[in-house]
Image (cartoon, rainbow, N blue to C red):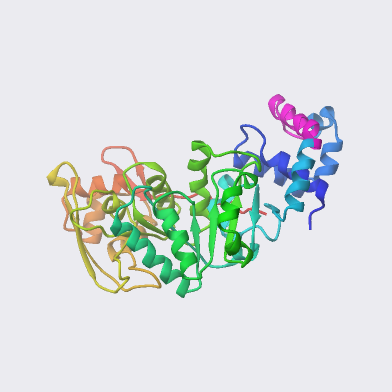
Amino acid sequence: MTEKSELTYWIGVSHLPRWTSERTNKFIIQILHEKKLNWNEFFQLDRNGWTDLYDLNEKEINDLENVKNEIPKLSFISERLINEGFDIIPINSSEYPKILKENLKIKNSPPIIYTKGYKKILSEDTVAIVGSRKAGNQALNFTNEIAKQCVENKKVIVSGFAKGVDKQALDSAISYNGKSIIVLPQGILTFQTGYKNYYESIVNGNVLVLSTFFPLAGWEVGLAMARNTYIYGLAQEIFVAESEESGGTWQGALDGLKRKRKVYVRVPEKDEKNANLKLIELGAIPVNLNLETKKLEYSIKSENKENEIHLEVNETVNDFGIKNSNFEENLVALLKLGEFTSKEISLKLKIDWNIKKLTDYLKKNPNIKVIKGKPYKFTIAEVFSPSMF
C-alpha cells in the first residue's frame, strides 16, 4: 500500500489547477517512472532544482509550490479519507481499473480515483446504461430489462446517478441483487445523503461509489459533464436507452464510436422523438427490448427527403444485442487499406446509394476521417492510444 505521505502528495498533484489529465499523467510518468523518484523526494527539491531538472514553465512551478504549501490541509483530507474507510487509488496502483486505462488512454485517464465500498468490483465485467434525464417509459423499460440481463450475466452496472435512465439502471440492478458502480459528479466526501440511502448495498458489496474529483468538491454542472467521460470509460459495453441530439449522452456515445467502442442503441418506436436512429446511422449497434435475433428495419430521415437512408440489418446476436451490419464491417475493412472517394467506395462495396447520400453518411460517421479536396476522400479515423505505465 502507498504510504500516507505519498497519498497526500498524490491528491495535490492530481488536482493541479487547469492541468489537463494528459499533462498530469505525462508529469507523473516523468517523475515516477523516468526519474525513478517518489513524491517525497520530488517535493524535497526547491524551485531551482525543479527548473534545472524538469521541463516546467513558471505557472507549473508555482502550482507545485502551492502543493508544498497546502500539504498540511491535504494531509488532513487524506487522513480523513483513510479513517472513514475510503480508498485512494493512484493511476500507477495495481488496483486502478485497467478498463479506464484501456478506454481513456493517457489523454483522459484520471490520475487518481477515490472509492467507497468493495473495490474489487472494478475488476469485474461492466456495462453502462445511459440516457436522458427525461426519458420516456419505453427507455426506462428498456433500461430495466438491460439491467436485469446484466445481473443474470454477472455484469456490473455503471451509473452516473442522474435522474432518468441512470437512476433507473442503478435501482433496477439493486432490485435484482446485482452490482453497481456509482460515478459521482462531485467529491467523494460530499455524498453523505447517498451513503445513508445506499448504506446496506455498499456494506454488502453490491454498490461501489467512485469519484475522480477533489474529495471536497461540491456538485457542479462542469463536473457532471466531465463525469460522463468516466462512466463510458469504466464500461466494457455501452447501452443508450434514449438520446437527444446534444448533451452528455449524445457526446458520450459519439466519443465511444470514435474510440471503436461497442455502443448499443435502443431502436425507438415510430412515434418517439429522439436521436437514437441518428446514432445508429453513425455506426451504433441497434438493439430491441427483447434482445432477440431478428431483422430490424428502420429509416433514418434527414430534413432533406433525398437524403433518407433506408437500412436493413440482419445479424446474429452476442450476449446483449445485434452486431453491426456487414456494410459497416466491410466499409471499415476497406478504409483501413487507404484513402477512397465516395464513388470508389460505392463501386468496391456495391452500395445502392447515390453518391451524395453516401458522401453525407461518410462525413457524419465519427469512425471515418474526411480528407478535404475535390472530390473528398475518406479513410479510417485513427485513435491515439499510447501505452500507460
Q: Position of residue 143 (x, y in %)?
A: 37, 61
Residue shown at the point (56%, 59%) measured from the top left: 99
Is residue 60 depicted above or below 236 in this figure? above
Residue shown at the point (26%, 40%) measured from the top left: 375
Q: Position of residue 12 (x, y in %)?
A: 72, 39
Is residue 143 depicted above or below 77 in this figure? below
Quadrant location of residue 266?
bottom left
Is residue 115 depicted above or below 248 in this figure? below
Q: Nearer the viewer, residue 16 or 341?
A: 16
Tell me: 291 left or right of 308.
right
Residue shown at the point (25%, 60%) measured from the top left: 349
Q: Position of residue 83 (x, y in %)?
A: 77, 52
Q: Residue furthest left?
A: 305
Q: Nearer the viewer, residue 149 or 285?
A: 149
Tell me: 237 left or right of 100.
left
Residue 161 can be seen, yes or no: yes
Tell me: 50 left or right of 251.
right
Magenta span contains residue 70: yes
Magenta span contains residue 158: no
Task: Locate the C terminus and report the quarter of the image it occupies.
Answer: bottom right
Q: Residue furthest top?
A: 58
Magenta span? 54-72
Residue 260 can be seen, yes or no: no
Q: Position of residue 154 (x, y in %)?
A: 51, 73
Q: Main secondary structure of the magenta part?
A: helix
